[in-house]
Image (cartoon, rainbow, N blue to C red):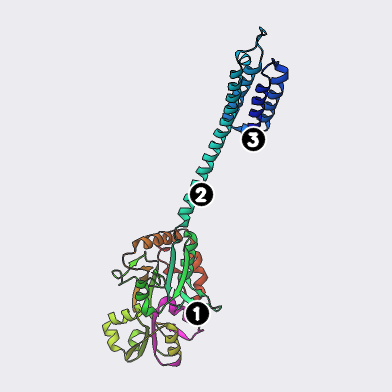
Amino acid sequence: MILVALIVAHTAAKNKRKAVNRRSLFGPIGRKLWKVQQTHALYRSIFVKRVYLLLYIIVLSCYHTKSSGREPYFRRNKKMKKLWALALAAVMVLSLAACGSKSDTADDAQGSDEQTAQDTSGGETQKLIVGFDAEFPPFGFIAADGSYDGFDLAMAKEMCVRLGWEYEAVAIDWNSKDAELSSGTINCIWNGFTYTGRENDYTFSDPYVDNSIVMVVKADSGITSLADLAGKSVMAQAASSAVDAINENEDFKSSLKEVVELGDYNMGFMDLAQGTVDAVAADLGVAQYQIANNDGDYVILDEPLSSEQYAIGFLKGNTELRDAVNAELLKMAEDGTMLEIAQNYVDQGLVLDSLCLINK
């Protein structure tokens, strides 16, 4: 378009002494303008179409000889010819500038949107760091290939996928869970974590599993009731709800020979198998897992020691993280995701009827 403007200006200056008829001057310029306006991509803009129309009018008025045969005033005036040529060039340059400005504005708007997106996504991604007991199947354990597995971990991992969060599972000493949470090494405890009786110590999600503390004995021990454990040794995991359940049943505790507190349930069941202890006080899911993986070696006494519920625990006062996790937990229960994940752990002792969010 600038080239067209220069052609018009040059032609107007060159023909200052002689009249130029419409065919010799307007024809070539008009054809040039017509070709440009038909092929140039910018012509698709309504604004530019109007600019081209204006150019046609200017060229026509500049070079068309009136019916009287007298040349227009600007053709007879040297200064006016230059002014018209400059005006024509200015209009064409302005049309380009306007189009460029419009394009730049669109580009700037797009760039602004992209920057906003970058600012939004550029912030630190939320990371869920799950503290769990690696010896607490089927909720958390080390799989045969060495990876961390379990119902609770699978739930946490799926939740992070749905929320677009980073996920990390950290195996912890259960006795040190409070220190790990307070230090920020983990930001939640999601591993068969008992809610009942701890409501004031943590910020909790809604309970999602009904649990019982049960007694597991060897199948051939002859022990069939809690009363039969009088004078016997009972193992429980240190700092667990099983210890709390024993302590709360003072008559039962006083009837025992001793309560042995160990770091994890694997050690406890090894002691049970060897006869070092007579029973293991364990969560129902853990007991079911041991029975499923030890054909006929163990049985669960019919009488539970206590009943409780599991929930996801957060540092006291961390309601922001709790609210986000809890909202997604409820969605997973409602849309069937929780049940679908749970079915993968039935063979490892998970009881589907214990999923209280599903069975409400």
Q: What type is the residue that disc 3 sits on?
A: Ala
Give the farthest residue toward the top.
68
Compute the Cα span from label 3 to label 1.
Answer: 74 Å
Query: Foreground residue, 94 or 132?
Result: 94
Q: Position of residue 104 (x, y in %)?
A: 54, 40
Give the farthest residue toward the right.
24
Q: Residue at x 28, y 69 (%)?
A: 200
Residues drawn in magenta: 274-299
* Residue 157: image tag: none
* Residue 114: image tag: 2
Circle 2 packing at 10 Å, graded few (<14), some (14-19), many (20+), is few
Q: What type is the residue that disc 1 sits on?
A: Ala
Residue pointed to by mark 1: 292
Instruction: Tell me if label 3 and label 1 are in contact, CB under 8 Å.
Output: no
Q: Position of residue 183 (x, y in %)?
A: 36, 72
Q: Position of residue 54 (x, y in %)?
A: 59, 23
SS class, disc 1:
helix
Q: What type is the residue that disc 2 sits on?
A: Glu
Query: Foreground residue, 54 or 69?
Result: 69
